[in-house]
Amino acid sequence: MPKREDISSVLVIGSGPIVIGQACEFDYSGTQACRVLRDEGIRVILVNSNPATIMTDPEFADATYVEPITPEFVEKVIAAERPDALLATLGGQTALNAAIALHDNGVLEKYGVELIGASVEAIEKGENREIFKSIVESLPEEWGAEVARSAICHSMEECLAAVEDLGYPVVVRPSFTMGGAGSGLAYDEADLYRIAGSGLALSPTTEVLLEESILGWKEYELEVMRDQADNVVIVCSIENLDPMGVHTGDSITVAPAMTLTDVEYQRLRDIAIGVIREVGVDTGGCNIQFAVNPENGRIVVIEMNPRVSRSSALASKATGFPIAKIAAKVAIGYTLDEIPNDITAETPASFEPTLDYVVVKVPRFAFEKFPAADSTLTTHMKSVGEAMAIGRNFSEALGKALRSLERAGATFDWAGDPGDKDALLAEIERPQDGRLRLVMNAIRAGATPEQIHEHTSIDPWFVDQLFLVHEVAERVRAAETLTPELLRLAKRHGFSDAQIGELRDMREDVVRGVRHALGVRPVYKTVDTCAAEFAARTPYHYSSYDEETEVMPRERPAVLILGSGPNRIGQGIEFDYSCVHAALSLSEAGYETVMVNCNPETVSTDYDTSDRLYFEPLTLEDVLEVVHAEQQAGPVAGVIVQLGGQTPLGLAAGLEAAGVPIVGTPPAAIDLAEERGAFGRVLADAGLPAPKHGTATTFEGAKRVADEIGYPVLVRPSYVLGGRGMEIVYDEEALKNYIRTATEISPERPVLVDRFLDDAVEIDVDALYDGSELFLGGIMEHIEEAGVHSGDSACVLPPITLGQSEIERIRESTEAIAAGVGVRGLINIQFALSSDTLYVLEANPRASRTVPFVSKATATPLAKAAARLMLGESIGELRAAGVLPAEGDGGYLPAAAPVAVKEAVMPFSRFRTYEGRYVDTVLGPEMRSTGEVMGIDAHYGAAFAKSQSGAQNGLPTSGAVFVSVANRDKRHMIFPVKRLADLGFEILATRGTAEVLHRNGVPATVVRKLHEEPRDGEDGGSIVERIHAQEVQLVINTPHGNTRGGSPRIDGYEIRTAAVAEGIGCITTVQGLAAAVQGIEAQRAESIGVRSLQDWGAALTEAR
Amino acid sequence: MSERHPVPALLVLEDGRVFRGESYGAAGTTVAEIVFNTGMTGYQETLTDPSYRGQIVVMTAPHIGNTGANLEDFESRKVWVSGYVVRDPARVPSNWRSTQSLDDLLSSQGVVGISGVDTRALTRHLRERGSMRAVISTETSDVEALIEQANAAPEMTGSNFLADVTTQEPYVVPAQGEKRLTVAALDLGIKGMTPRRMAERGIEVHVLPATSSLDDVLAAEPDGVFVSNGPGDPATADHAVEVIQGVLERKIPFFGICLGNQLFGRALGRGTYKLKYGHRGINQPVQDRTTGRVEVTAHNHGFAVDAPIDSDFDTPFGPARVTHVGLNDDVVEGLALLEQTAFSVQYHPEAAAGPHDAAYLFDRFVDAMQGEAADNATQEGNR
């Protein structure tokens, strides 16, 4: 069936800000969908609040709305654009929920918009447990599909009877308790009496659900694709190395499935197809998860997602079958046999990819950012990113995947004492970040395969693979010399030069030298969907120590772009954005673009993005080998290291030392900006002030610096991104603590001590420099107080409180620094304006996190321009070529320019402490946000209101506001709070705050804190109770006192965490409060509209 | 840790390309046509598929043997491949049904194999140059001699292995549940799953040796006749072609799979030809021309029927049509007579290994036989 002719415009909904569990994989899928639909001549309308995405670049849709993904705003877009159809299956749960809401409130019907992909009925069938259960049970009996057996019990007698059938261990879930309170796993009758007994008491309906435990079973996923002619294919099977009990997003996963016979695999396949048909996902991709009992092969169907998912992105990268692209095509009417397989060009998409390699995905966690959080892995996803690696066998892929994580301690090592075997065996029972390394240590300590399996339930085949790796390590260690055969053996099982070096007591570069001298180098194979049955047209490569390479010779000069590796807090999609743009613009400029990256969620690792893709770890060894392979294939113009964040920057020196040409700002200049002394001289030469500072490697040194410049001081390690380990220290005791616990301090990496500028306005600048001319990309003013990491702080562009003269000073300072450092390309500078002095906080001669935000707010493709500058073009030439505006820049924006607010999105609700409470939500100098949204409008208030709607639940327009501020903030909060009272909000306040408000004529109701005794006339419960009762619509709580190592400031902790638990907005700075009041006013005026980026851009171009 | 002492092995192709690896399975020397299989699951079914008689099989999936071998997944009484080429054999099997390791199974059946080979390079070579003869040896390192040995071996074209693979004596696979129909199945190397799929549908299957005459077939008083898959060049199987023609003349419902499809094509007067490197895998898209639906199917064939895919053609038994086409390369994957119930497919609806998408063909066969039986009953009644 060919394309439907009745659809000429489609609204695509993205997934909004990056949050844990919903990351840039949906940018990848959405971008693919937009591309496909536009290629088909369909008008694409896009809504996504996340400015860091590729998909929201104006060139990927006809009308791009960076607006909150709420039913209200999407309705406004629908009213303005009147699309024929809505495609919501590519934007994660966010898009699906928005589509359901628009269906339920009648908007889709009102405007005649057809939901394509999955129907509302199918979405509900997939998500409703009861309906899903009945679907699974209706499948043919011989397939053996079950859901976990369960029983609802109202008494201990019923519980005991149910366990007769379910067996121990059994999961106990009391009905209708807050946050699943009282749940537990009962291993025997005593446990059952204890857990179910108290569960029955806790449950308001005296009811508990008992469910058979499938912990420790093998876990699988199948990615399924269906078209409207009911053709169904399985794109990929994925096996979780971590058995049931760990969220698949937090598990190490392997594709294809490794430990299934064909009989078992085909049963899963039959069930998956049966389920997708019964659920009625008409077209598109879906994902279905299974648990398989290793004792007898029993199959329990866990769940299905009637949409493209994180696993779909992984499966697409793992197989070369572009799920989102195909899903978009089948959504508009094509059948799978009508769609060509891009990779072979000659065979159709109606087949099942077959792999002649192994793919391993490993999650990356950020527990170091949340020290109070319980790091045990559960069914609640906690990882913030992932790395994928491809090898010709499991051990090679695993080794590559672990080193792709770029974390000290992620890879196996065989140095030192592994520890006590029994202690290790006990430790590996707890699923946790790095468990596999502990397993390896247990093996080193003498554990048997049976013991490992018994304590982890990891399948014996995988356990044996770990023993194999261990045996290879022992051979490498024991060998007299490194022979080619031995090196090849180690390499084929995933050992890095560094690991071999450690085993042989040799330096990594010496191992590499020996290896090269012996002619042991990797070859590059191709991901081709068909195990070489047909020739591949797309150069999507991975390395392996095998016989034959498939890299083709080429004529045009190549530019290698190093990506940013696994997403982490502080380094995510924003850097991928810059890498992708470099690829697009250098391809236009006539270069052959070669992408190197290992993050399966990204657009950069789409085989369509660059001319060549190497799915490889971003370590010096792996990158040098890719460079070598490409140098063999043809001329290499250079390597770009400045766009992918800290990951490629960290490789710059090593690459340069190996003679690899680095284009753009040279590594020495990058170092110059990082190195305090040298950078100080640049500032001094330019006559620019920096806050008083010093460096130290010991407490005594740090104390001397702090004493001289005065507390509070900002302390941090050098060479980090995302404010890792950065703290504001108020006294000597805290400084001592900081130095004692900081691990990364050395003479090469001293701790930096800066005077902390309280009450300063912080300013971020992104600019381009070509050696003689500056292009000011944009100036952002932080909305949060100084000391909040720029990645976590809301900011506004253009700066709303800065005058012309201040902007001019910023421009001059930026140019002086860019020239002094020697920038060719992008530079990001942070300033602080305090008492009319413009301090330089830091300068980073590389792409920053804000590049995509600035590019969208000013309709200027900064990353594209940067890439061209790096290869030698000038700003003048780029203006002439139309890459940059002919005149003006982001420093002076005309009145027609929009105001754009960037707001950070925090992951606090994901993390619980060991006691089961939420972690604290106070912002600080260490970045903890996972994502961001943009609110864009003609005025600040509306833009801020949009940013809040996009980031969380939005600002209230009426109701009660709770106010509790630190003493230093009391003076500043009077006016905004009075304004809220005037707008009709009920003001609730703690005693101290209320007294100040009363004295200023603002009526406020006193609410007691959690631990205060009720006084006369106070009977409405504590503030925490009121928040939980949803009696408060906004919380304003500015904390005081020290933070230490991420531990909470006790004051207000319960209040803020209660707000997180209830999803209520919580403002923690006075500046944020002022912005919120403006936003609330704009919302109450009910005049907030929507406007596409293309419209804003056209208005801006006209006004320039 | 059990220290393994790998025994070196050589794989030499007739065109002189050499791959070095380690011995896997039995030691020794084997020479045969070399082909690749792209299935990621189902090595046990593949190894025991009689259609692989006379072939060295290269597995493109790197890890082989992970689930060991069990007692249920044999498709016939033994391992048939002449040699086995893998990259990373499992050291320990892991599956609740496993009773022995694959290595042990291969060794005990004397199957010579080689591991540690760049199977992808080998596959690309075979894809570009076509299937060819090859030798695996653990006994000599004399490459020249092995090249000579490969070139001296008989080619697949013209080969006939039916006497090796067929059953010596007829046997009956009883219907599961109530018996509804009887089928005579000519065993040219039948896979165990095929009679099982029929038995599940109430068919009593009389499996007959390849040399059975038309009278032997008719003696079973079948409601339908089935001709199985099998090894070798279809051009050499003249006897079975004659039997099929006899069946068609008597208008007995006919169903053929794989070699059965090729021989049905020959019975209709079409020729067969050798594909460059064949179809061997479980991910092959086939379109049913009558419904437009695409099935993902299991394939194992090096030969194909030469018939027009875009128009019907005449046969001594009336008009016929290509009903199924392989979408990767437009190869004929199914045939049917239009005026009587006789059809066949080149691929494997019985799967094992492979997807079950095409299992409906067994239902179609049952429906055809039941329809025919009903018609006959009506005619009897009218008479």
Image (cartoon, rainbow, N blue to C red):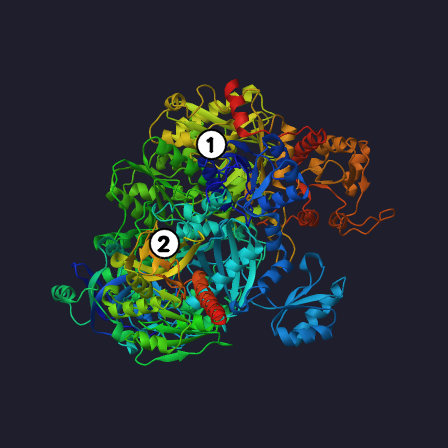
Q: Secondary structure at mark 2?
A: strand
Q: Chain of mark 1?
A: A
Please name the amino acid that badge 2 sits on: Val
Disc 2 sits on a residue from what chain?
Answer: B
Residue A1040 is left or right of residue A367, and the answer is right
Q: Where is A65 relative to B271, above or below? A: above
Please state the total of marks drawn on the protein image.
2
Q: Which mark is residue A59?
A: 1
> How far across and how far down the image is residue B195, in percent?
41, 73
Circle 1 crowding by C-alpha within 10 Å: few under 14, some 14–19, many from 20:
some
Residue A1039 image offset from top left, x and y in percent: 67, 43
Q: Nearer the viewer, residue A356 or A7?
A: A7
Near mark 2 (Cα within 10 A), the count class, few <14, some 14-19 or many ≥20, is many
Residue A110 appears in the picture as rendered: yes
Q: Position of residue A880 (x, y in %)?
A: 39, 21
Residue identifier under label 2: B325
